[in-house]
Amino acid sequence: EAGVVQSPRYKIIEKKQPVAFWCNPISGHNTLYWYLQNLGQGPELLIRYENEEAVDDSQLPKDRFSAERLKGVDSTLKIQPAELGDSAVYLCASSLERTGELFFGEGSRLTVL
Amino acid sequence: GDSVTQMEGPVTLSEEAFLTINCTYTATGYPSLFWYVQYPGEGLQLLLKATKADDKGSNKGFEATYRKETTSFHLEKGSVQVSDSAVYFCALSPNQAGTALIFGKGTTLSVSS
């Protein structure tokens, strides 16, 4: 069974440029999460989807971040414009149940110069 | 709000030494508790979990017991190996509608031969 797939693995951009990250969850997993992981810190939730509905986006900085999950499968997280402080690893995870085990992708490491 | 506190690292041990990584939590209600591990260059993966008080989770020689009276979920292993070198994250699931896993900051373990 394929795991959670994220791309790109690494991205280097200049500040004020846009960037997008893509996530393909495990087949059949209805719940999808985007987490932010700063260096030396634990993951922090940005947004959680149940199927195609964003049910928890309270921690998503909506002035520059946006996300979508079309058809309840793949998801895209976008930052526009990027700031220096956005340099971090963006993790995608999926699960069968809301309180069940989360399966993580390898993450997308963003460096903003 | 709910939170997880785990001991700061790095933890440096020799092979076959005993390992303890402390984790305490603050939560309303009855959360589920997890330990995730992140090996170098890989995504986070579930190591073990416990869903109610006095449950013991175990996997790959690691154990942790859900202690409600001390709000703790300490990770232990009797004899560590070089291959156990990784970052370990304690996490809780509040088991409430509209919430997701909350992670600690992570503890880096380095085992030398």
Image: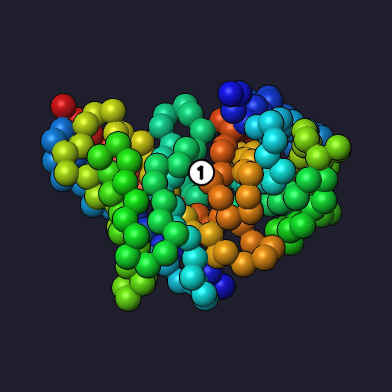
Image quadrant for the C terminus of chain A? top right
Which residue sits furthest right? A70
Task: Check disc 1 and report the residue beneath it.
Answer: A39
User: Is A37 located above or below residue B73 in the figure?
Assistant: above
The amino acid marked with disc number 1 is Leu
Chain letter of disc 1?
A
Q: Is residue B71 visible?
A: yes
Q: Residue at x 68, y 39 (%)?
A: A29
Closer to us: A43 or B69: B69
Closer to us: B46 or A44: B46
In the image: residue A49, left or right of residue B19: right
User: Is B108 located above or below residue A59 in the figure?
Assistant: above
Instruction: Give residue A86's position: percent from left, percent from top.
Output: 67, 44
In the image: residue B50, left or right of residue A30: left
**Residue B18 sits in quarter:** top left
User: Is A71 located above or below residue B82 in the figure?
Assistant: below
Q: Residue at x 40, y 56 (%)?
A: B50
Q: Is residue B9 visible?
A: no
